[in-house]
Image (spheres, helix red, strand yellow):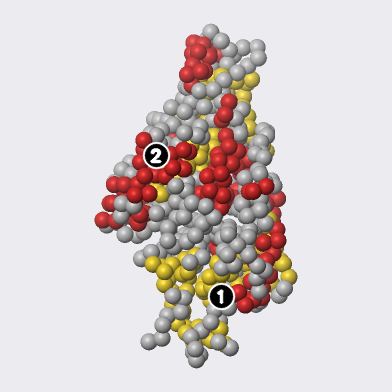
């Protein structure tokens, strides 16, 4: 049953009351499990659950009086009965999957509610793209709530997107049935400086009584942070240390601690609870960005909860951070997040709280997965042709497009270089002495070339700069049309001819990721929808992504989930240094800087 035709609590109240009173049989009864009560932080053995019309009607020591001749019986056999897991902040596009295929991948891991911000597709297709994501989300057998993207572009004046989101767009979307709030407000300098457009988007959301998502990626916790909080964002997931988490909850925000494919920010922040003893109700777990390989091989929110427990968090507190805390934050405490009467019947049976094997998943009252196998269909939206032909280069690229000329007569130059930081979103702003050959600046050692290729308006524009940290060697290049958040094309390579081959290949297939070495394509992940997603099954996309990771390693890269680092090199709202279609951007000052420093 999809969100679109799932009955509300008031509609089902007569049935719930009749079952709880014993006047009517339940649809399903789960018997003799340990009830994990996230409201009271109790483990209550030998309890039963009665479900009717997709909602919990009764939770108590004996539901035998709710059983009729047609009632389905599920034997818990002493296992823990925990609420379905909620991902408080995530981008479906980062999984390289459509909402349907993302749901199909995570349901067996126990995720039954997602709060997703489709700002990736908003940058490519605008409000239409958001609507496509929203509509497919509503078709799924689990709860996918959509946050209306707030920042396309994420940093006005520093990048050019395929489409822009306006306050009028936000106001319109607040009336859509699946919109839960405003997506992460990445333009934190705009909010802190009182930018009228950003404040208009926040105001439209608040007038609708919905939640404003935050994104404060600066380490400065002084007046700018205070101004940002005063502007209205209610949560933040960009913290990387204990002080960040503490600062946010002290100011009345929810601290969202993320464990994605490449972001490992739980361990460094959860000590605010485990060691400092802060009230855990204002701490929430999320993934932010998970690619398909992580989903297929490692898990989703179950992986995050296990990690929090391994970091010393009490298992039930960790579960609260992935269930009731999330529901409360978005105003859905009476709808999801706990096993209590009236709520949607989303739950997991597991034999261990610490190891969290996901043995049975129930969503809206029916079994949707058992022992890793999905038991329901996840319907697909009919994506229009306009969503599939989005890579427009203007002309066929050659090695010459990737040349970076040195100043006249220079034998070497001082270059500003983007420094990749493993397992974190921030980069380092580095400087390096680079050689000049035949009038062109060349990479050396670990420093290779990066280019941002415009792909929305066929301008033919290419911005060239340098990046370090990938460890590439030999003649190679990797290109991707996933380039957060403007989603042009990022090409990183050691050889300009390989860079041209990779870029042209993605134009040919309509978007995705490719890697070339010595003139041969070692790997290709086709992402035909907006150049961001595939509607193929997650297992197939993950297999292709795994080949891509192996190809990166074959070219010398040993970073954990290096593809995620590659895809974020154009994200001009996270310090310190990024590349955009308009140039090299110092995100500490939100100013463009030269790639080559002037000679002294």
Q: Position of residue 444 (x, y in %)?
A: 55, 81
The residue indicated by pointer 2 is 205
Left or right relative to 157: residue 224? left
Which quarter shows the N terminus? Answer: top right
Farthest residue, direction top: 23
* Tag shown at residue 358: none
Q: Is residue 492 above or below residue 91?
A: below
Tell me the CA gap for discs 2 and 1.
43 Å
Marks 2,1: beta carbons within 8 A: no
At label 1, counting other C-alpha atoms closer than 10 Å, the crowd grade (few under 14, some 14-19, many 20 or more) is: many
Camera sees residue 520: yes
Q: Nearer the viewer, residue 56 or 524?
A: 524
At label 2, counting other C-alpha atoms closer than 10 Å, the crowd grade (few under 14, some 14-19, many 20 or more) is: many
Left or right relative to 228: residue 397? right
* Tag shown at residue 448: 1
Element carrying mark 1: strand
Q: Determine which quarter of the picture holds residue 553.
A: bottom right
Q: Residue at x 31, y 51 (%)?
A: 194
Give the label, 2 or 1, closer to the camera: 2
Q: Position of residue 516 (x, y in %)?
A: 68, 69
Camera sees residue 548: no
Farthest residue, direction left: 223
Element carrying mark 2: helix
Q: Nearer the viewer, residue 243 or 49?
A: 243
């Amino acid at each position: 049953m999809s969100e679109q035709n799932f009955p509300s609590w008031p509609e089902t109240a007569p049935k719930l009351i009749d079952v709880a009173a014993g006047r009517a049989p339940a649809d399903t009864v789960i018997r003799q499990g340990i009830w994990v009560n996230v409201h009271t932080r109790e483990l209550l053995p030998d309890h039963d659950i009665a479900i009717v019309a997709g909602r919990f009607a009764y939770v108590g020591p004996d539901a035998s009086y709710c059983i009729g001749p047609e009632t389905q019986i599920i034997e818990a056999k002493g296992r823990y009965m925990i609420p379905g897991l909620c991902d408080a902040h995530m981008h479906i596009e980062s999984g390289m999957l459509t909402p349907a295929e993302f749901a199909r991948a995570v349901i067996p891991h126990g995720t039954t509610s997602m709060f997703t911000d489709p700002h990736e597709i908003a940058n490519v297709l605008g409000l239409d793209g958001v609507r496509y994501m929203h509509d497919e989300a509503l078709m799924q057998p689990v709860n996918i709530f959509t946050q209306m993207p707030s920042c396309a572009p994420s940093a006005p004046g520093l990048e050019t997107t395929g489409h822009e989101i306006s306050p009028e767009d936000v106001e319109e979307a607040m009336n859509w049935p699946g919109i839960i709030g405003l997506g992460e407000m990445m333009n934190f300098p705009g909010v802190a400086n009182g930018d009228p457009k950003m404040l208009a988007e926040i105001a439209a959301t608040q007038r609708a009584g919905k939640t404003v998502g935050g994104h404060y990626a600066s380490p400065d916790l002084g007046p700018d942070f205070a101004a940002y909080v005063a502007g209205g964002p209610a949560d933040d997931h960009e913290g990387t240390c204990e002080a960040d988490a503490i600062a946010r909850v002290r100011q009345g925000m929810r601290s969202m601690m993320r464990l994605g494919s490449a972001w490992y920010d739980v361990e460094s922040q959860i000590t605010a609870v485990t060691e400092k003893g802060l009230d855990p109700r204002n701490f929430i777990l999320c993934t932010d960005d998970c690619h398909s390989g992580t989903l297929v091989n490692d898990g989703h929110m179950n992986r995050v909860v296990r990690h929090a427990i391994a970091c010393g968090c009490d298992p039930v507190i960790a579960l609260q951070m992935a269930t009731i805390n999330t529901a409360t934050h978005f105003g859905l405490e009476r709808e999801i997040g706990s096993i209590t009467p009236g709520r949607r019947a989303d739950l997991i049976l597991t034999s261990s709280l610490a190891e969290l094997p996901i043995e049975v998943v129930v969503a809206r009252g029916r079994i949707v997965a058992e022992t890793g196998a999905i038991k329901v269909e996840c319907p697909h939206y009919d994506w229009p042709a306009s969503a599939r032909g989005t890579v427009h280069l203007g002309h066929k690229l050659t090695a010459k497009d990737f040349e970076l000329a040195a100043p006249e007569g220079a034998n070497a130059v001082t270059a500003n270089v983007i420094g990749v930081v493993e397992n974190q979103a921030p980069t380092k702003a580095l400087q390096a002495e680079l050689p000049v050959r035949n009038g062109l600046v060349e990479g050396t050692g670990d420093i290779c070339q990066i280019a941002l290729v415009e792909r929305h308006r066929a301008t033919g524009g290419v911005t060239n700069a340098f990046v370090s940290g990938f460890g590439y060697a030999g003649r190679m290049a990797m290109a991707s049309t996933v380039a957060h958040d403007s989603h042009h094309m990022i090409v990183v390579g050691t050889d300009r001819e390989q860079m041209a081959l990779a870029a042209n290949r993605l134009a040919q297939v309509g978007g995705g990721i490719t890697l070339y070495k010595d003139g041969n394509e070692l790997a290709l992940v086709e992402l035909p929808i907006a150049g961001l997603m595939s509607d193929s099954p997650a297992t197939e996309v993950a297999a292709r992504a795994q080949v891509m990771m192996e190809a990166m390693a074959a070219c010398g890269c040993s970073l954990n989930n290096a593809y995620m680092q590659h895809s974020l090199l154009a994200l001009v709202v996270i310090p310190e240094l990024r590349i955009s279609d308009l140039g090299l951007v110092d995100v500490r000052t939100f100013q463009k800087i030269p790639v080559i420093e002037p000679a002294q």
